[in-house]
Image (tube, rainbow, N blue to C red):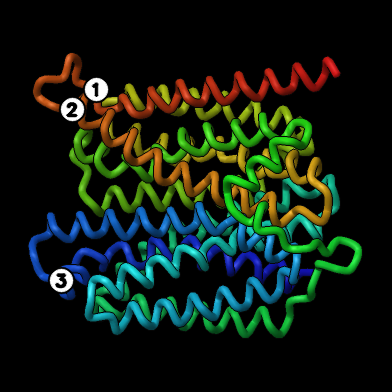
Amino acid sequence: MRLPILFILITVVLDAMGIGLIVPVMPALIQEIQGGTLATAALWGGVLSTIFAVMQFLFGPFLGALSDSIGRKPVLVVSLVIMSIDYLVMAIAQSIWLLLIVRIIGGITAASGATAGAYIADISKPEDKAANFGLLGAGFGIGFVLGPLVGGLLGELGTRAPFYAAAALSAFNAIFGYIILKETVTKRIIRKFSWARANPFGAFLHMTRLPGIAWLLIVYFIYSVAFYVYPAIWAYFTQERFGWTPQTIGISLALFGITMAIVQGVLIRLILRWVGERMTVVYGHLFDMVAFFLIALVSNGTVALILTPFAALGAVITPALQGLMSKIISDDAQGELQGMLVSIHALAMITAPMIMTWIFAFFTQPMAPIYLPGAPFLFSLILMALSLFVFLRYQFIRSER
């Protein structure tokens, strides 16, 4: 099983890199294609990022349900092939509308993370699921670090270079997966495809009918919005509060990503062994609440840099929740569950930046009732407390039954 797991990890890393890899060159690329000012390029960049997340929200359950029906391997391999072609088109695009179309397609193929999660669920024993889902989180952390780093370096060769590199990586991984991946959807768990469950709304209604799942999905969403305060606001917050340069911001995000990869890939196994999945969720919430409070109020840039990897230690919640939910769901619906989680995460990616940037702008404007650049982190602290309350209420109801 080592080679299939390696393939899944590479796929997750590529999904995470796919966003960060092109970020350093997107402003220049948009201006090269469309012309106009940097401000105009930023507006188009926001549209491209939003449409990417919207496609993940809409198509996560579709690809997850499809993999329950036709198998994990074809969905993963075909998604990688399309992803490779998508990057090649971006590399030669001369129209902003063509760029918009390929970002739509890219968002759909990136939703294959649902199938990757389902594959991990298929090959994991119940007691190992949370820890193995942690490997997916580690892959995301690695991609989060490598994406902007590689994109920035390749960007020195030209605005199109990162896209050619991403296309090549996706193509090689598709070939690798086609050769080594064994299908895990057998006759025992194969499931007829249903359009009613292949969309985020239908999938959510179906999932909420299962005992306990609705509570955990709500926890997952609230937590995702709260945790997304980092990518949504970190660059603005640290520049305003500490006067950090882009280089320092990049270093801090790299520290965060590396620590998150270590936590979800290694430390979570020890934590799960010591306290179990449910207490791991509780610990993660408490840890993040403390981290958000400290970051919101810290006034020293060096202390903030030290707190950056410290804050990533709470990143055990996602795999622990995934493990709990995967145990509740039947083997023939693992793809549907993972697709639902991809949609929830994408919805958080859409929601959090709007909320967090508005709070930041309100508390840093000249007419603000109080100057507080860290206000978004205090808001996230409140969300974390709400998420923990919902989880503990779920545990209480479950124990009463």
Q: Would residue 240 be found to the left or right of residue 252 on screen?
A: left
- The residue beneath circle 1 is 372
Residue drawn at 35 percent across, 75 percent down: 162
**232 or 275, nearer to the observer:** 232
* Residue 332 rendering spot, x and y as whole percentages: 81, 56
- Residue at the location (42% across, 34% down)? 307
Q: CA distance from mark 2 to mark 1?
A: 6 Å
Question: Residue at point 34% right, 67% down?
Answer: 22
Q: Quadrant of the N terminus?
A: bottom right
Q: Earlier in the sequence, mark 1 or mark 3?
A: 3
Give the amino acid at mark 3: Gln
| Residue 193, percent from left and from top | 73, 63
- Amino acid, disc 2: Thr
The residue carrying mark 2 is 364
Whether tag 2 and tag 3 are in contact, CB under 8 A, the answer is no
Label 2 to label 3: alpha-carbon separation:
32 Å
The quarter of the picture where residue 101 lies is bottom left
In the picture, the disc for residue 257 is none
- The residue carrying mark 3 is 34
Q: Position of residue 164 (x, y in %)?
A: 38, 82
Q: Nearer the viewer, mark 1 or mark 3?
A: 3
Picture layout, residue 370 above or below residue 279: above
Nearer-N-terminus badge (2/3): 3
Look at label 1 and name its amino acid.
Answer: Leu
Q: Residue furthest right?
A: 188
Q: Counting residues from the N terminus, which is met first, the one under dot 2 or under dot 1?
A: 2
